[in-house]
Amino acid sequence: MITADQLLVKQINKSIVLNTIRKKGNISRAEIASITGLNKSTVSFLVDELINEGFVKEEGPGESRGGRKPIILNINEKAGCIIGIDLDVNYILIVLTDLMANVIWEKKMDIEIGESQQTIIERLIELIDEAISNAPETVKGILGIGIGVPGIVDYKKGIILLAPNLKWENVPLKQIIEDRFKIKVKIDNEANVGAIGEKWFGEGSKYNNFVYVSAGIGVGTGIIINGELYRGTMGLAGEMGHMTIDIHDHQCRCGNTGCWENYASEKALFEYIENQLINDAKDGYINKENFDSLTTLKVIDYAQRGSLIAKKALKEVGKNLGVGVVNIINTFNPELVIIGNTLSLAKELILDEILKEVETKSLVYRYSKTKITTSKLELQAGAIGAVSLVISELFAYPDI
């Protein structure tokens, strides 16, 4: 009789084998045994099981070091597909990927700020339908759907508790999507999702302690400690966009006064530009007539082409991002801080300002030089991170 403990040990060992193949690639059964410390017969049994399930493939014989040539193993990235969704305030970005997060298909749909919850969910369902229709034939089919949302999430139940910029409260999005598609759904805060994506496939892959800062319409943080996402007592950690920077400032959408988000988000970017225009600042790119049609991507493009207003605005937001990053470094002493979401596309313009703030104001940085960079995944960070929600569970529990 097989006991529950034996099944658990087998599951753990199977996960170890699968992740060793994922991390190393082009590896033999003997090398897996050597790296993991598992005996060769256990490794062979688990590898054969993973091959039969479609998760691992044999590539053919490798180089011999004396004796029979080893058979080389790799992850079968075409075993199944995963859908990842970045549900933002003014767009939905959806990707369809293989098992290694390589994008097969993607689509971005703009949404109007203030659109109803029902309309946005209907559009979300339409996009998922379209992703499924674009999925190639695979052994496992669609393995899961991951969704990143801008707000406080009960990630275990998949309920959006509060998304102030969407004006959503207590929305059971996981249940809605699972009932419609009969596919397992994972939902988390978009900054957590971005951090997981960077850990698995981005700038954070070689780091165990880092903070991902999502700087878009709002500001949020995903915190990786000892290689794992830090969630806090109830899974609500990381809302650093709502730490108080100025107790005398105006009210944030969350109800607090003087949040970091008020100064270091897209909202702050456009407020700065509007004030410049009110004071009759001029350049050949931004004026009062085209202000209403401005997007963050347009502002960044104008700055790169020489717009003084755009440059000043991005530098101001970069400086204010730096104020929060100082607090992050002083609090967590991370190896790395990654700036993601739309404002990260300004790259050097904001990074230079962040570094100036950190170098002059962070006590910890004087003794421990945290690396500060922008997201490797850029605008796909949220969607790839959502894919990683599914992949991380799959690689932890391949039997499911």
Image (cartoon, helix red, strand yellow):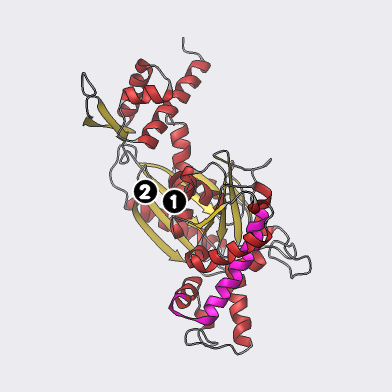
Label 2: few (<14), some (14–19) or many (≥20) C-alpha neighbours in 10 Å: many
In the image, which disc is placed on residue 97?
Answer: 2
Q: Which amino acid type is shown beneath numbered disc 2?
A: Thr
Q: Label 1, on which residue?
A: 384
- In space, the residues marked 2 and 1 are separated at their CA atoms by 8 Å
* Camera-nearest residue between 235 and 280: 280
- Farthest top residue? 1
Q: Reply above or below: 293 against 348.
A: below
Q: Reply above or below: 247 against 396.
A: below
Q: Which stretch is magenta? A: 304-328
Q: Reply above or below: 217 against 129.
A: below
Q: Is residue 168 visible?
A: no
* Camera-nearest residue between 241 and 356: 356
Where is residue 321 drawn, in percent x and y? 61, 63
Where is residue 241 drawn, in percent x and y? 65, 58
Q: Which amino acid type is shown beneath numbered disc 1?
A: Ile
- Residue 270 location, quadrant: bottom right
Secondary structure under badge 2?
strand
* Camera-nearest residue between 69 and 264: 69
Q: Is residue 107 visible?
A: yes
Secondary structure under badge 1?
helix
Left or right of 239 on screen, residue 381: left
The count of marks equals: 2
Quarter of the image containing the C terminus?
top left
Q: State the residue at coordinates (57%, 43%).
A: 209
Where is residue 275 drawn, in percent x and y? 63, 82
Label 1: few (<14), some (14–19) or many (≥20) C-alpha neighbours in 10 Å: many
Asked if residue 348 lies in the magenta stretch, the reply is no
Q: State the residue at coordinates (50%, 64%).
A: 342
Q: State the residue at coordinates (65%, 53%).
A: 366
In the image, which disc is placed on residue 343?
Answer: none
